[in-house]
Image (tube, rainbow, N blue to C red):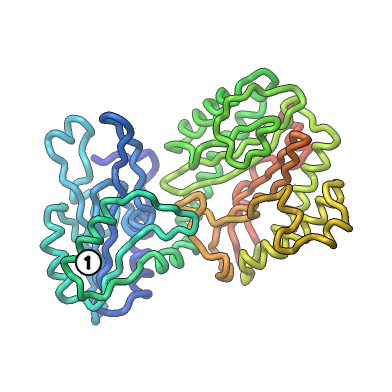
């Protein structure tokens, strides 16, 4: 029996996702999607396997050496879906345990035609002979910088060499459009990841004190995540104090917390392949100083404005553009910029970037930085973060606050509302 840590996801999710994909494909189209590679460390070690997000989205299968074949016929009743999985041999059964059986793969994916991987080449050849277009998958995430040649890359090159006259197309743009709008099942999974993350924050407040190492807190946080159904952090956790709060992706987590410092915790739980991403800033001494409060409140003010702008019909590009004026105004009020400086600034290099270097929102889902366009209008069902920040290295003050929200027709829903964020609420948690 293939074991998972969470209740089995409704197979209707993957069936519906495939049906949506079909609506974006022309007739006589073949789609091939392959699993990610198993990545080695040193010697005979391997990293934890991470499934190709698009393959998981369409099948629910978490296993390596998996291939999904879809064929859209001229007659919809003739559409075909075939899942190819690796058969468990005696060696694998002894050392790693069993893989999916045919029946388990059918139950998980709602695909009835499941075959062993050894059958793929012959089946693929027959479908290639009748296909007018072939959609293949590569990593086209806007933040991706691929430097490795994967097994899928090599297979695509071999396929084009063997079948040079076929019309090859990109699958990724279609998948990105599909994945932006979450189904109710997906929203529930993201909400669960947020709830687990909330437990981690709720359990950590009273453990924060001067003299403790950041990595000790990391251990407590991870323990809470795992005990509540998460397999691991959604991304390398950021647990930064003092001057390190101004390093956006500080993951060493090896500093001793000092009296008077701020502690920035940016973490998220992974649950059933879906992710949370939450940031809070906590005073190590239990109370914010007046200056820390002022900067914190400025970040809250930016977040409040962002909540009003993040709505159906807006685009992330326009949203971020509208927020720049609000961010600049808050920096002026903090005395970090002057109105005169702002009036004279080079608009190609706005001054607010000195203290706020990153975007305020990104898509969230099967990836922490999920797929989605900054130019597409936001739709109900989209999940994003809201994470404004102000960083003042010369004052050892770095404050970033981050919530996860669902876009709805009537406004946003805060999926992380159970995690304290107001100044008074944070201080109360430190003295509970």
Q: Is residue 274 left or right of residue 43?
A: right
Which residue position holds label 1? Answer: 160
Which residue corresponds to the image point at 33% horizontal and 34% vertical from the top-left?
Answer: 41
Nearest the viewer among 364 and 104 is 364
Q: Is residue 365 left or right of residue 398?
A: left
Specify whether residue 163 is in view: yes
Asked if 299 appears above or below 201 in the picture, the reply is below
Relative image position of residue 290 (x, y in whole percent): 86, 35
List x then y, in percent, for residue 33: 29, 60
Q: Where's residue 325, x and y in %?
A: 77, 61
Image quadrant holding the N terminus, namely top left
Outermost residue, top side: 211
Residue at the limit of the structure toward the bottom, as seen here: 74
SS for tag 1?
A: helix
Residue drawn at 25 percent across, 61 percent down:
156
Question: Residue at the spot x=56%, y=66% of the render?
Answer: 380
């Amino acid at each position: 029996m293939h074991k998972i840590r969470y209740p089995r996801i409704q197979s209707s999710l993957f069936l519906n996702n495939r049906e949506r994909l079909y609506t974006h494909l022309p007739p006589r189209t073949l789609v091939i999607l392959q699993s990610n590679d198993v990545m080695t460390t040193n010697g005979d070690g391997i990293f934890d396997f991470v499934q190709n997000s698009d393959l998981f989205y369409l099948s629910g299968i978490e296993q390596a050496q998996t291939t999904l074949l879809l064929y859209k016929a001229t007659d919809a009743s003739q559409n075909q879906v075939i899942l190819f999985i690796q058969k468990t041999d005696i060696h694998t059964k002894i050392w790693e345990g069993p893989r999916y059986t045919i029946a388990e793969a059918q139950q998980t994916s709602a695909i009835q035609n499941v075959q062993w991987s050894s059958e793929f080449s012959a089946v693929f050849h027959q479908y290639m002979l009748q296909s007018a277009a072939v959609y293949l998958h590569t990593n086209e995430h806007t933040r991706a910088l691929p430097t490795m040649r994967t097994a899928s890359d090599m297979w695509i090159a071999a396929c084009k060499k063997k079948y040079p006259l076929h019309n090859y197309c990109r699958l990724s743009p279609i998948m990105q459009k599909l994945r932006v709008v979450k189904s109710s099942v997906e929203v529930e999974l993201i909400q669960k990841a947020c709830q687990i993350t909330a437990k981690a924050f709720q359990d950590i407040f009273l453990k924060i004190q001067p003299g403790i190492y950041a990595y000790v807190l990391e251990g407590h946080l991870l323990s809470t995540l795992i005990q509540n159904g998460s397999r691991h952090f959604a991304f390398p956790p950021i647990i930064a104090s003092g001057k390190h709060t101004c390093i956006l992706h500080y993951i060493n987590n090896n500093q001793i917390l000092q009296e008077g410092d701020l502690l920035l915790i940016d973490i998220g739980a992974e649950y059933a392949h879906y992710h949370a991403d939450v940031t809070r800033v906590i005073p190590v001494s239990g109370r914010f100083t007046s200056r820390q409060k002022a900067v914190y409140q400025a970040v809250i003010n930016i977040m409040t404005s962002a909540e009003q702008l993040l709505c159906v019909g807006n685009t992330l590009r326009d949203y971020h553009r509208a927020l720049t004026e609000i961010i600049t105004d808050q920096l002026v009020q903090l005395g970090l910029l002057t109105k005169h400086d702002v009036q004279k600034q080079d608009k190609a290099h706005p001054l607010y970037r000195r203290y706020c270097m990153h975007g305020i929102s990104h898509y969230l889902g099967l990836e922490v930085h999920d797929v989605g366009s900054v130019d597409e209008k936001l739709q109900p069902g989209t999940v994003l973060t809201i994470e404004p920040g102000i960083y003042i290295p010369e004052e050892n003050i770095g404050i970033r606050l981050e919530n996860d929200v669902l876009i709805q027709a009537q406004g946003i829903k805060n999926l992380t509302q159970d995690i304290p964020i107001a100044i008074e609420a944070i201080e109360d948690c430190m003295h509970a």
